[in-house]
Structure formats: structure tokens, C-alpha cells
Image (tube, rainbow, N blue to C red):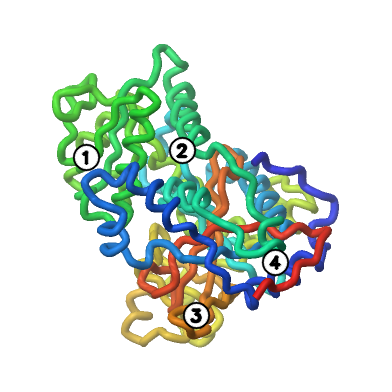
Amino acid sequence: MHSPPLPAAVDRLPVDCRAAAEVLNRGCACISVDHQSLQQALEAGAGSMSHAQLLASRPHLFSDSMVFVSAAHLLRMAQTIAVLERVVALPAYRDRVLAYAPAVARHSPGAAGVFLGYDFHLGPDGPQLIEINSNAGGALLNARLLRAQRACCEPVARMMPAPAPLEEVFVAMFRAEWRLARAAVRPLARIAIVDVLPEEQYLSPEFELFRQLFEAHGIATVVVDPAELTFDGERLCCRGQAIDLVSNRLTDFAFEESQHVSLLAAYLADAVVVTPHPQAHALFADKRNLVALSDAVWCREIGLSEAERELLSGSIPRTEEVLPATADAFWASRRRWFFKPAAGFGSKATYRGDKLTRRVFEEIARGGYVAQAIVAPSERRLLVDGVEQDFKLDLRNYVYRGDVQLVSARLYRGQTTNFRTRGGGFAAVFPVPCQDQRRSCA
């Protein structure tokens, strides 16, 4: 899916498909997942873990139902992403964000960075970008989930997403990273998927799925802990084999921890391609960047057009850095804000202002946090054990070099996105066409 051109007026979204999507999300409680198909897709890459064991150990990984999103909202998200990708390429933006980034982020490798995750809430004014992640997990799991969907009624059948060769797209993306960094001197031969204690990670089944996918395309692949990597000054190695490319799943975005010393040295020496890499995180995923991106005055100063500024100001909630000097003002207005660590991930150490204790806020006020204007997520109503329940949802756009590859939803209850809610988890997204009102099939 290629990023569409920016329209002259970005604030006049069609109403019909948005209303239709809301009606469907409230009234169509169909089960859309074909569990036999999902079982086949997952067991193909689950290693020694059966489908039943996988879901028993991660019972809330997948929701049984889909989420309906208007084509207008999908278009608006893609347009916002296209503008942001253009902003990130501007020297003024890069100078600003790299000034407060870790020193390692100033190293510029050739690779672009795989699996950027642009996460949105659907607010009253349309999609609102709540954050960007530089190593968004779940893309391959969601690709398999999308293949396992079935239409529960004829209106939904008309909205079923067209089949897409997403696995081929993902493999091509990693090969593109290799070519960008190495000018295609030879084919990509070996990948290491790297995370701390990978077998203990919640998304470890996806690591195995990727390993099998890469190997099916002729690329030797290992899933390893960073402590298994060694660097001799010329090559990054693992288990006696040289590594061409590291598929980076670490959450130490600057490679500051001691067990990452070999990876850091090889990265700085350009002895291995790392994707995503520290600079990608600094340019896209540091939460402080949203302070700049939501500042319309600064965006005008760096050369954004009026239409681009309108789009960003209407799509990015106001975001401010929390400093000791402004702590009292933020405490007084805390109910309006969501507080996030600048280098955070996975909703860790994030707080709604109306749930904050004074003790926790005193830690936030020391610095390292941003405050983002609260945008309540939209909801999806489902039947769980015969009882209607309302789930919050957010939408993740998986993006590479400005192209949206896949949009998926995450359903949850509670303050933040999680995989602990019965009936929640990853959900496929069904686009609702704008030219055709849809009614609930319940």
C-alpha cells in the first residue's frame, strides 16, 4: 500500500463510512477467525510448541473478531504517515532530535529500519497518532491472522481485505535493507534475530515464524540472545558463523547495556547491518519528537506547507516535555494528560493523569517524560462468554520507508494496551468503503 498524495483539504473526511464503521463495531459481534486455518498457519512456525500449547501459554494473543475501520480513516492515517516521513528527512528536524538523542544515534547506517509502528487512536476528530515505535512486533502474526479470517455474513464478506502476499513483502524488505547498507555486493546470506532471552519473550512464536520464513527463502537464520554474539574487529559472529544482518528486537535502543557490547562495536564499525537501528529509534520513536511534531509554529518555520501543518495539527495530540520547572502546572492539569517515558515502549511506566499518585508524579517530574493530551480510544463491542463487553482499541500501521504494509488492531480493557484481556488481543482490520453504508450483521 503506497502512501497517497496529500489532499488540499484534509479536514473534510466523508461521514458515511465512519458512521458505518462505528455501527458495525457496536453491533456486529461475529467471530471471524477460522481457528483451523489459524492453527495451520501457526503450527507451521511454532517449532516444538503446538497450536494448543501456544494459545494456552498466550491465551489473549488473538481476538476472535475483527475490527471495522472506515476507508477515510485508513486514508487519513496513511497521509499523516507520508507527511511525517517527509518531515523526518528534513535537516532542521534531524538536527533538533539528534541533539538530545544518545551519541550512538548520530551514526548513520545505510539501512532505513524495518517495521516502524505508527499507533493511532480513533478520536472524535479522526485518527490521532499516540506514538511511533521503531521495532513494532506482531507483523507476521497479524499476517497469519489475516489469512485465517472468514466472513460471518454477506455484508462483511464485501469488506474482507483482499489477499496480499505479506510474507513476500516482509522478506523483500529485509533484502532491501541489505542492499541499502551494502550496495548489493553479494546476496544476504545469514540473519540473526536478536532479543534478550528470546524464548521467554511474549512474541517469541513470531521469532520462530520469521526464522522459518527467511530459511524458506534461502536465508540462514538463528534466534539468539545478544550474549551469544562476538565481534573480532571484522565480523559479527554467532555460534561460529558470520552474521550479515541483525533483526533487532531489543528494547535497549542505544545498545547501552553490557551484554550488547559486541553488537554495538560491530554496528559502529559497519561490520553488520542492524535493523531497526539506534538512529531509526531516535528519529522516529523518541516520544520527545512528538513535542516538535505537534508544534505548528515550529513546523511552519522548518518549511511545512499549510496543508501539511493542518494535517499534523489535526492528527497529533498536543505533546509537551515534563520538566521540573513545569511540574506544578502539569500536576494541576494532570487529568488532561497521559504521561509517557521519552524512550518507553509497550505501555511500560505510562500513566493516565487521573490515576496518578503524588509519589509517582514526583518521579515523573524529575524528567525523562512527556505529557500527551488524552485521546480516548474508540471501542469495539464483543460477546465474551455470552456477555456483551466493550473493548478499547488502537490501530497499528506497520510501515517501511513510508509505505503502509499492514494495519492491525489491538483490543484491550484497562488503562493501556495489553494482552491480558479475555476476548482481546490482535485483531484483523476490515476496511469499510466510504461509498457504501453498512449495517450491523448482528
Q: What's the CA distance linking mark 2 and mark 3?
A: 35 Å
Q: What's the CA distance linking mark 3 and mark 1?
A: 43 Å
Q: Is residue 64 above or below residue 391?
A: above
Secondary structure of the residue carrying tag 1 is strand
| Mark 3 residue crowding within 10 angstroms, few (<14) / some (14–19) / many (20+) | many
Amino acid at pointer 2: Gly
Tell whether 145 sits left or right of 249: right
The residue that disc 3 covers is 330
- Find residue 93 and report its image quarter: top right
Q: What's the CA distance linking mark 1 and mark 4?
A: 41 Å
Q: Can residue 103 be seen in this view?
A: yes
Amino acid at pointer 3: Phe
Amino acid at pointer 1: Val
The residue that disc 2 covers is 113
Amino acid at pointer 4: Gly
| Mark 1 residue crowding within 10 angstroms, few (<14) / some (14–19) / many (20+) | some
**Label 3–label 4 contact, CB within 8 A:** no
> Given this view, does label 3 or label 4 mark the residue nearer the observer?
4
Q: Residue at x 67, y 61 (%)?
A: 156
The residue that disc 4 covers is 126
